[in-house]
Image (cartoon, grey):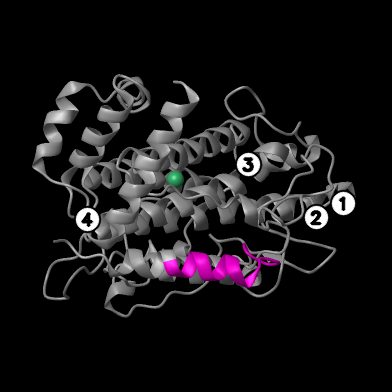
Amino acid sequence: MEHNAQQAQKEEIMEHNTQSSKDTTSRRSFLRKGLAVGGAGLIGTGLLANGLSLPAFAEEESGSLTKGDVAILRFLAAVEILESDLWQQYNELGGIQDSEVPGGSGSAAYIKALQVLDGDMSQYIHDNTEDEFSHMAFINAYLASQGADPINLDKFRTLPSSKATGAQHIGRLTNLMQLTVDTSWWTRYRSRTQNPDLGGTFAQAIPGLSAGKFPAIPRHDGDLAPANHIQAIANTAGFHFGYIEQGGSSLYPTLAQGVTNLEVLRIVLSIGPTETAHFQTWHDKAGNAPALTDPTNGLVFPDLNASGGEDTQTNLIMPEPTVFLSRKFPVVSIIRPTQIAGSGGAVATIKSFTADGLFIGQSQEFFAVLNQLAAQADAARRG
Ligand SMILES: [Fe+2]
């Protein structure tokens, strides 16, 4: 498209965004304007290139996005950007660097320690990373297609990279070198009597990880030995993978309940379960983390099967049935929590990520932006 036409289109989009922020975002009017300006240009070809064929134009008769829908998608885009950033760091050192997930060149000692959890860890890290990038790109592209503002957090890419051989030296959004990992998800998914939505609380599987600051990637090549130190780093990553993806597993169904537009609901319901697919995988792999004590800092990974109790048994990786909605109902195997604006909601997710240490070193503006996006998403109600 010629420059002038592009400029005109941008102005149309900006004008539309201004209007939509006051009320709802009308895809229909956006498409009409876009097509009027661009003809068969940017908007039309963009949609077609993304697989939205003509019937999609007819479907938009069914409704438009509410402010709540946009808020939910914008928050999810932000979370996916954050997830992409942290998974990228894992992939550079512990995954597979290729055309699908470029960047970095791997750390042999770290990969060897990860492979103690599963021989396919590098492939899984690669695939989880690619998935998060695809979520981020799709949600942002969809927002733009609706005339809503996509999310861009590039100005907050200020945190340091690992100095270990294999990592890129670029600014990051998230910190993986001083983590305080909440491992209560492990016992939460094993409990048959408690649910956070009904006030349940849960013990830490790895108490040491939840009280201190530990690296989940080697910070420098000095972290590659002794053997139980780099293994502790890989173990930390293993439990952190599960922590991150259980968060996504609750966040999507929690926010889905506030969605109004059916197509947005389809997006949220189609992406969310992939987070659970990740979680299920990581849940299984974390159970293979060997019991050890890190000689450099005293971090203990206990033998989770030693007690003989179900609360920590390593092969109980499928959600145990538990109480849901009310204790008057029979127990049921479910994702938990899922209460609207509850402990799996948007605000709680940012609070949890902050407690995890993911944002150590970030600016006040960063937290302000994220917290505002989160509050708006939690406030969305089905209209
Ligand atoms: Fe994701």
Circles 2, 1 touching at the beta carbon (< 8 Å): yes
Q: CA distance from mark 2 to mark 4?
A: 53 Å
Looking at the image, residue 274 lies above or below residue 344: above
Q: CA distance from mark 3 to mark 2?
A: 22 Å
Looking at the image, residue 103 lies above or below residue 311: above
Instruction: Judge depth for marks 3 and 1 and give the one in front.
Output: 3
Q: Which mark is residue 24?
A: 4
Q: Quick one: SS at disc 2? A: helix
Q: Nearer the viewer, residue 5 or 163?
A: 5
Q: Position of residue 196 (x, y in %)?
A: 34, 73
Instruction: Judge depth for marks 3 and 2 and give the one in front.
Output: 3
196 sits left or right of 348 in the view: left
Amino acid type shown at disc 4: Thr
Q: Nearer the viewer, residue 205 or 218?
A: 218
Looking at the image, residue 146 lies above or below residue 180: above
Q: CA distance from mark 2 to mark 1?
A: 5 Å
Residue carrying label 3: 88
For marks 4 and 1, the one nearer the N-term is: 4
Q: Which mark is residue 226?
A: 1
Q: Which mark is residue 191?
A: none
Residue 116 visible in image: no
